[in-house]
Image (cartoon, coloured by chain):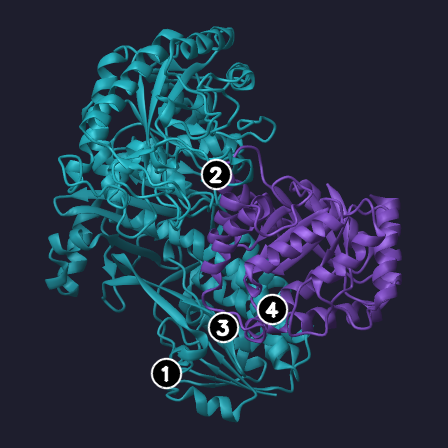
Amino acid sequence: MQVGIGLPNTLDGTDRDLVLEYARRADAGPFTSIGVFDRLVYHSLDPMQTLGVCAGVTDEVRLATSIIAGPLRSTAMLAKKAATLDVLSDGRLTLGVALGARQDDYEAAGADYRSRGRRFTRQLEELRQHWEGDDIGPEPVQPGGPQLLVGGESDPAYKRVARFADGWIGAGGPPRRFGSCAESATAAWTESGRPGTPAVWGHGYFALGDEETASAGEEYLLDYYAFTGPFAERIADGLLTTPQEVVQFVRGYEERGCDELIMFPTVGGIEQYERLERIVESEL
Amino acid sequence: MKVSVIGGGPGGLYASVLLANTYPDWEIDVYDRDPADNTYGWGIVFSDSTLGRLREADYRTHERITDAFTKWDPIDIYYGGEYIRCRGHSFAGLMRARLKDILRERCAELGVTMHWEHTVKDPKAHAEEADLVIGADGLNSTTRETYEEAFKPRVTMGSAKFAWFGTEKPFDVFTFIFRENEHGLWRVHAYPGHKSTFIVECTEETYENAGLDEMGEEEGLAYFEELFADHLGSYNLESKLYQWRNFPLVKCRTWSHENVVLLGDAAHTAHFSVGSGTKMAMEDAIALQEAFIEKDASDLESVLNWYEKERRDPVNRIQEAARTSRKYFETTERFTDLEPERFAFNLLTRSGRITYDELKIRDDRYADRFDRWFASHATGEARRTVARPPMFQPLDLREVTVENRTVFLPGPSSEGTTGLPGDRQRARLVDLASEGAGVVMTEPLAVSERGRLHPGTPGIYTDEHADSWTDAVSAAKEHTGTLGAELFHAGRRGATQPRDRGLDRPLSDGWELLAPSAKPYTRRSQTPTAMNETDLETVREAFVDATARADEAGFDLLQLNMAHGYLLGSFLSPLTNEREDAYGGSFEERVTYPLEVFDAIRETWPDEKPLTVKLNATDWRPGGFTLGDAFRTGRHLDEHGCDLLCVVAGQTTPNDRSKFDSQVLERYSEQIRNELGVPTMSTNYITTTDDVNSQVGRASADLCAWHPPDVDVHY
């Protein structure tokens, strides 16, 4: 399993310098990918543009949207942006897409919320068409388009993985839950008659430091996921606040067959990067 | 803080105990419509893990409860004149009334005010007065109803009828009795306590046959006292509230709204056969107490979110197991053809939580007896003292003996050229054969050029193809195992790109496709040609020719694909077959062509070799092929000489509502097997020997498609 690092693109005070520093250091450091979150009605940086800036200062790491809400965007625009990012990163884009559960994001984007499932299915089918076709360029560097991962923890989501994608990306949570979801995605893949196995990616959240850091991280998660009610508590519950917890978590994901685990900071500043880097370099 | 608890059952009382114990200055009032000493129900059951949690939450209650306990660990099963005991299931139980006494006493000690015979008609008034309202008012919760908009409850009724009785007759362990009489099959769940609990359950039909709908209490009790006289002896059955009910499954979207929270049966129910109702209510109470400790009481939303976060997963798991268990008891008639040993194993493993390996841990002597019985059953030998687990027992199909119950069933790959298998496709057969599975299948082989899925789909429609397979088969025969070839015609799913990047992506330069009707598979797919008389004849001949070649190539077993929206499967489904000739319309007409093809193949394929069919259990689509259709198709195939059904589902149309939980395909396999009495192969994604032993052991399937993690079944 490989470990990636999330950019603080939804955290307060994140600016050009911090994003570039994260990206440069991740590229030179032990991480194999950098991830970004997606939220419209929030004081966050746009995921695709943030990765675009990172593409210019990195050579090795994969750039992953982890995860963006597909149906919030027009398919042709999304296809073009993803293809562009793939070209500008020389074939390093992993496009993680899911439904997105924020109704206010949909309202703000002028996209219909209720029909998003149906539109998402169609979108996945059309993305490949755009990437393989001649009408909407550029031609992606990765043959057939960027690596495409679909998120979600329901039967329709697993079916989308099997029919259209290269793999599944989990939304975070304890290793056990990741394991059972990844198994469902693999079952869907196999039972649908796809060759090989799907790529499976996961997420974790960390806030390393003193108690104050831990509660700042927890507060951020409760705020970021407030719209999910009890689920926010569940996510905050899983916040990793000590090196021991990080190591246990990473091992747990590894044991359950995760291919790439992206660890997201929940507190701003470069210290979080440094603390995680130290653990990954010395303990894993 | 002022707390109103609506409902004075175990959940409500226990929540009051815990909160009063942690927060002595809170003002806690419990309201119940019944008198203090009234109690419905008989005994309740706890497992080991629940007890640990009770001890941590409040030591005194735990001590008094455990003092009152009856403990036992076997489960006894009476079925078909046999008696089977399985040990190692730790249970403890007590009378519901006794539990309430203990909790009432504890409430009084802690200063909780209890208002008995006080019906709360308007929970909203309490919500205005109190800081927190706990809706612990049970199955028919007024609280839940009052805030229906917020909780969004869904209540679904089980199909079986049941009634609770008590008896002085000591049932000293958990006892299941299955008894058939002229009215039907009766199930009894009996368990120990100060008095024994004796629950009788049956189908609606049996209930009516016996005339229970018109019988009064006295007559009803007498009926069962006579029916179970051998178990009850001279003891009577007693009834507190003589009533036959259907089990209501309660689920809620959320369990809290503003300052109101649901707990216990008010929030969620689980069928009594998993004995978890009171356990869940009391665990809810513990989580609620913990939520207050974890979060600040002034931020009630956080507290209740935390509570719900903590409980959602465990409750879901129990409800899922209970659903499976309830279904088992609703449909037990389907298992009455099973031998008692297998019937019991199936009963013990019904909910999926206890597997073959788990039974071995709980009672290795039981598991050993089962292995020995299974081995002698599978081999036909009268007695086996030393036996390997079910997975390793042989299965006879015609004159072929499959050495064990595992199957490698690879999916489509794309490395052939004009039907000629590629090197890797042939090597796969040999490699897989060296791994020791009972049956190694080829991927689906096209019976004609137009029947290919991709340009690289291997076929068996020319002599050159057959020769190529002959070489692979003879190399594979160096190893043990049965070799099978699967034949298919891709129909309207043909002419697509390899599946590396997705399914059903049409080729830009495809070939003409054939289907029962001219309907494309996806919006983008090529429109197929509806088959005319000549096409029907040609394709039938192609299947026959391929069959002869598969025989010559040396395959031991042949599987005909009638599933997954390929050609023959799309004749079966009303969604894809709109023909107006003799091959479309009613079910019997839709099944005609696939049966003709089957008959023609059976005639060509040697009598001593088995012929199996891959069949959809359902299209997972309204208006599509249903499980009932699968039963009917399976019955026809059985009569026409089919030796085994390989059970799959979905993909008839791309917009199906497929399910991928780990058991759904196993359940279909089980239903088809036991409804029709034909051998089946299950195809759900399973990766462990435990899965295979459990499925074969409980008669869900005779063979299992298997995906051990270190073997690439699909290259």
Spot occupied by residue B230 in the image (x, y as percentages of width and height): 23, 43
Visual hue assigned to chain B: cyan
Tag 2–tag 1 contact (CB < 8 Å): no
- Label 3 to label 2: alpha-carbon separation: 32 Å
Dot 1 falls on which chain? B
Sequence-earlier tag: 3 or 2: 3
Q: Which numbered circle lies on residue B60? A: 4
Residue at the disc numbered 1: B33
Spot occupied by residue B132 in the image (x, y as percentages of width and height): 55, 84
Q: In the image, which is nearer the foreground, mark 2 or mark 1?
A: 2
Spot occupied by residue B395 in the image (x, y as percentages of width and height): 37, 19
| Among the 4 quarters of the image, the one containing residue A102 | bottom right
Dot 2 falls on which chain? B
- Label 2 to label 4: alpha-carbon separation: 36 Å
Q: Is residue B368 above or below residue B46?
A: above
Respond whether the residues carrying marks 3 and 1 are from the same subunit.
yes
Q: Is residue B171 above or below residue B270?
A: above
Q: Which numbered circle lies on residue B255? A: 3
Q: In the image, which is nearer the foreground, mark 3 or mark 2?
A: 3
Q: Amino acid at mark 2?
A: Thr
Dot 3 falls on which chain? B
- Label 2 to label 1: alpha-carbon separation: 43 Å
